[in-house]
Image (tube, rainbow, N blue to C red):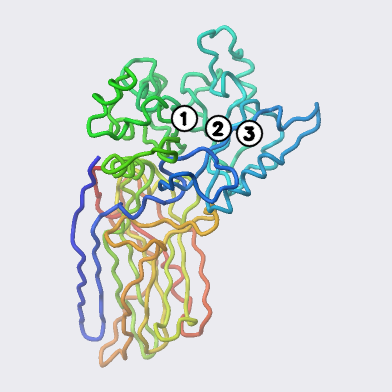
Amino acid sequence: MNFIYVSVLLLIVRRTSSAVSYNWTYTYDPSSTAWNPLKGFVPYYYWTGPQPTINFPHSMENQYFSMKSLMRGPNLFDFSSIDSVLNNTAKRNHHAIVRVYADYPGKSQRYDGDIRIGFWQIGFLGHWGEWHTYPNATYFASITHQNQITAAFTSSFTKTKLQLRYFSVTGNYNPINLNIGFHDDSFFQDTYGQSWMFYNTSVTVGATNQWRSQPIGGEVRPELMPCAFANNPTIVCQSITGLKPLDWSTCVQLTHSTYQWLSYAFNTPGYSDLDYSRAVNGSIMQGYSFFVSQIAVSEITCSALSHVMRISVTMSNVGVAPFYYPLTLNVKAADSTNKSAAIYKSISVPISNQLDQFSFVYSFDVTVQTYANIQFSIWLNSPYLVGNQTIVFAISGANTSGIIELPAVPIEPCGTQSVTAGCASYINSAQINGTLGTSYTIRSNTNDFHDQCLSSVSYNTGIALKKTI
């Protein structure tokens, strides 16, 4: 459960004729990412309170809904209980994880794509909507009914991420052909080992790569919550519950878990001392972890008053899972003495760039037509963030705003020799799984910055970067 820290902060300035290049490198440190959105440990919904009893780091809340509370008649629905939960969680800058343990048709028209929802667990069938009726398996829904529920959800929910309980209980559907993730509601106890367990079942049905496009979550086995992060969980848990837990890191790495419900962390007595620190690390190691290893700023064209500056951001997701909703990497260039003069550029970060811990270089070209000190800022954003949520980079000294703000770069006269490297689109050293980015936006509120290099807002894959967490 220990994190590896690498590299040192380094600034290199190089001047050739009038061209200047700057290079900053960063240390990997995920400790500031504990509150990042759409990942980590999750409490049960805490109604109208400002925070749970113990404000352990979290960004989501979980809530069940019964069919009785939502369906008042054959064609009469009351959504007020769901809306109330979504409104309350959003006010706290949180997403909700929703499960209706008796679902009904038509709700996707209201909630698909609702950014207040983190993940929607397909309930409806079985005890607690968990798709089983253990110990009386004969009472469970037929294959026909499983198919109907699965088809209804996958055809109507196209934006909000869905999850099912079991890889092997999907009707006649092959899980790898479904846009559905899965949740292990006995995490840390029945996650791996025997053939019927969560991970082993994914192996049997050929769905071990489902996490690459669909989220994996669940709930830590309730009996094991108090002892999950003891110094020796095996000994402590067995003495308390008689259950022998698995290895936490192995559970996370095999399943590529993005989140787990863990109510114990948020209620008295909760975790204390070293158990608390280990629990925070256990939360951080789930889901995504975006590491910026290097940022370079260089002048690629200089002619009279016109300077084309290239900002290249080397970034990798060294976490165990991607960020499952649309994501952009953004750059702001501003006159450090006149903050209102600025230009903003953004480029999409597809899930394909977030897998296998490969490092990618995202390059933005900005034309500056002034002599000034220009400050560049870099951050991640998603239309699925709520309230004041930010995605904090996994670097040492990270700002909780999620923004890397570089020292000001002076833009000076070209001198006697102009640099004429041009500003065309480019892609170098493409990895086999690399994809050239074509989705971007740009806006400017000043004539000091121009858009002539819009075509060079692109990225290229870089050298493979591997981190062990």
Front one among 217 and 381: 217
Residue 149, x across and y down, in percent: 63, 24
On residue 183, the disc is: 1
Q: In which quarter of the image is the C terminus?
A: top left
What residue occupies the far front of the structure in this picture? Answer: 269
Residue 252, x across and y down, in percent: 33, 34
**Amino acid type of the residue tagged 1 in the rendering:** His
On residue 264, the disc is: none
Marks 3 and 1 close (CB-CB < 8 Å): no
Q: Distance between the residues labelled 3 and 1?
A: 20 Å
Of marks 3 and 1, the one in the foreground: 1
Q: Distance between the residues labelled 1 and 2?
A: 8 Å
On screen, residue 75 above or below 292:
above
Name the residue carrying label 3: 155
Tag 3's secondary structure? Answer: helix
Residue 323, x across and y down, in percent: 43, 47
On screen, residue 369 above or below 166:
below
Residue at image location 39% in from the left, 86% down from the top:
306
Q: How far apart are marks 3 and 2 (CA)?
A: 15 Å
* Direction from residue 149 to residue 119 in the image, left or right: left
Residue 46, quarter of picture: top right
**Amino acid type of the residue tagged 2 in the rendering:** Gln
Marks 1 and 2 close (CB-CB < 8 Å): yes
Q: Can residue 352 be seen in this view?
A: yes
Q: Disc 3 or 2, which lies upstream in sequence?
A: 2
On residue 121, the disc is: 2
